[in-house]
Image (spheres, rainbow, N blue to C red):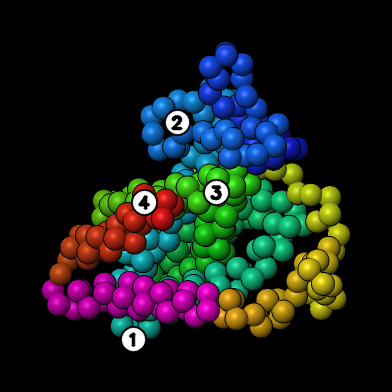
Amino acid sequence: MNESTISVHDLIVSVESPTAQNGASVNIAQQQDPNDVQLPSFWSLYGLRVRWTNPLFRKMLWNIFLLACSWSLGQAVFFIQISTTTLAATSFANRHLATIPIGFMLLIGTVLSVFLPRAVARFGYRPPFYLGALMGMIGAGCCMAAAWHKFYWLLIVGTGFLGGQVPCTLYYRLAALQFSTQEFSSKAIAIVIAGGCLSALLGPEIAKHTVNALSKPYSGAYLTTLCECAMLMFILTIIQFPSPRKTHNTHITSSLSTITGDNISINGRSIFVIAGQRTFLIAALGGFVSWSAMAIQMAAAPLAMTGSGYNFVQVTTAVECHLLGMYAPSFFTGSL
């Protein structure tokens, strides 16, 4: 499907309000005062029915739904690694080296997340997201071969490639803003993240039922991971991503980017300028604390439970409950 040359965000603002008493249709874009005409609440049946009559609104919901499916598949890939890779590494190498593959995957994902926004600005959403899904397929294949032959070093290589898919998955929620109005933006992000509830069930359950599906332990889970990355790439071909703006076709350099008054140069702000802002430091600190707490628990819990005599199914069930607790609030956080 061809990429949309006009963003749905630019078109959906022309959605028409309910028919007035005289039977005339009132266009919100033509109102001088936006408070004169207000659509009913989105979460009400009447509000949804009113909006559903506009094909652009249906197109917006369709693309956001596909992004939620992409988020669910991408997170399921990550959760399979959380449930499986640490225990697989324990069977391949020394127990003290079991958390290195997961740590390497997160490290690669963190480094690539710095370059992903610039790649999106230059090439659009589709090529970087395709590359992320392709790296996930390569990584899953490497991990499957590592599980088959018990090569610890190949497991690290595979998780490194899987790390390239992690920042792309996290970026799906931001891509949802390209399809939503300003009024709907918070709900669009919440809907995409709510797809994590499905992945919280999908990832650990897949790991449970495929860990011994093949003759070699853990290889079945990695084969499923490869199939999920292939499905992810297929869904990405359906989403109608907007074309990159012409202003983004210029070469982006961080060292020459400057800020003049209230305007930002065409190349954007330097990462050093952004990193020096107080709001960025607070956000980075919050992300560091929350992700560190999650990573410590998710990497150590499988080892601790296994050492205490729990089997693989019980370990993945505990991981599943933790993941549901992470994403269940997404159903109401968009309205806060």
Q: Nearer the viewer, mark 1 or mark 2?
A: 2
- How would you rate the neighbour count of disc 4 (Cα within 10 Å): few for under 14, some for 14-19, many for 20 or more? few
What residue sits 32% from the left and 54% below the top? Answer: 328
- Tell me the SS state at disc 4: helix
Q: How many numbered marks have been drawn onto this rendered protein structure?
A: 4
Q: Are marks 3 and 2 in contact (CB under 8 Å)?
A: no
- Tell me the SS state at disc 3: helix
Instruction: Identify the residue under disc 3.
Output: 185
**Mark number displayed over residue 47:** 2
Cα gap from disc 4 to disc 3, whole angstroms? 14 Å
- Of the two numbered discs 2 and 4 on the same chain, state the one appearing first in sequence: 2
Residue type marked 4? Phe
- How would you rate the neighbour count of disc 3 (Cα within 10 Å): few for under 14, some for 14-19, many for 20 or more? some
Residue type marked 3? Ser
Instruction: Identify the residue under disc 4.
Output: 332
Could you say which is closer to the camera, residue 16 or residue 197?
16
- Tell me the SS state at disc 2: helix
Query: On the rendered structure, is 300 left or right of 228?
Result: left
- How would you rate the neighbour count of disc 2 (Cα within 10 Å): few for under 14, some for 14-19, many for 20 or more? some
**Mark number displayed over residue 96:** 1
x then y, percent, for residue 39? 51, 33
x then y, percent, for residue 236? 58, 43
Q: Which residues are magenta?
A: 282-309
Cα gap from disc 4 to disc 1, whole angstroms? 40 Å
